[in-house]
Amino acid sequence: MSVGKVIVGLVAMVYLVILLNIIFYMVQMEAGLAFPVWIQVVLGMCFLAISVSNLKAKHYIFGSLFASAVILIGASVVVTYVLG
């Protein structure tokens, strides 16, 4: 296993822990992002389109970053509707 793969794996794990922590914090505080829901939905659709485009172009890092943004915005919308 090369050093580069270990570093990429470590960075991915740290990023995943931070993303899950942000989602857990939103659920715990019962507050989503500080935008109206309709803006969050539009932003989520834009991020989804960019993510799919990047993944089709085999730009996996950017595609996964935008996919995680879609997950974060989706969690925010759910928290806003269910808990807010």
Image (tube, helix red, strand yellow):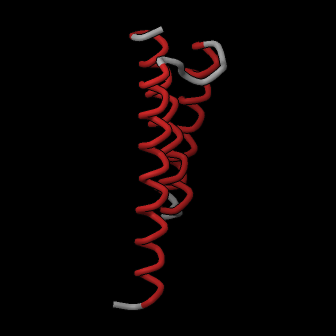
Please provide percent x and percent y for residue 48: 51, 38
Q: Tell me what residue is drawn at x 42 percent, y 25 percent.
A: 27
Residue placed at 49% from the left, 67% from the top?
A: 11
| 76, above or below 48, in the image | above
The residue lying furthest to the front in this view is: 29
Q: Is residue 53 above or below residue 31?
A: below
Q: Which residue is at 57% across, 38% downward? A: 47
Asked whether 63 or 4 is in front, the reply is: 4
Q: Percent from the top left, x then y, of residue 73?
A: 52, 30
Residue 84 x, y percent position in the rendering: 48, 8
Residue 32 location (% of width, % of height): 54, 21
Q: Place residue 79 in its image quadrant.
A: top left
Would residue 61 be found to the left or right of residue 5 on screen? right
Give 59 or 39, whichever is nearer the viewer. Answer: 39
The N terminus sits in image quarter: bottom left
Please tell me whether residue 36 is drawn above or below residue 19 in the rendered image: above
In the rendered view, tell whether residue 18 sits above or below residue 46: below
Q: What is the total number of numbered labels drawn onto the structure image?
A: 0
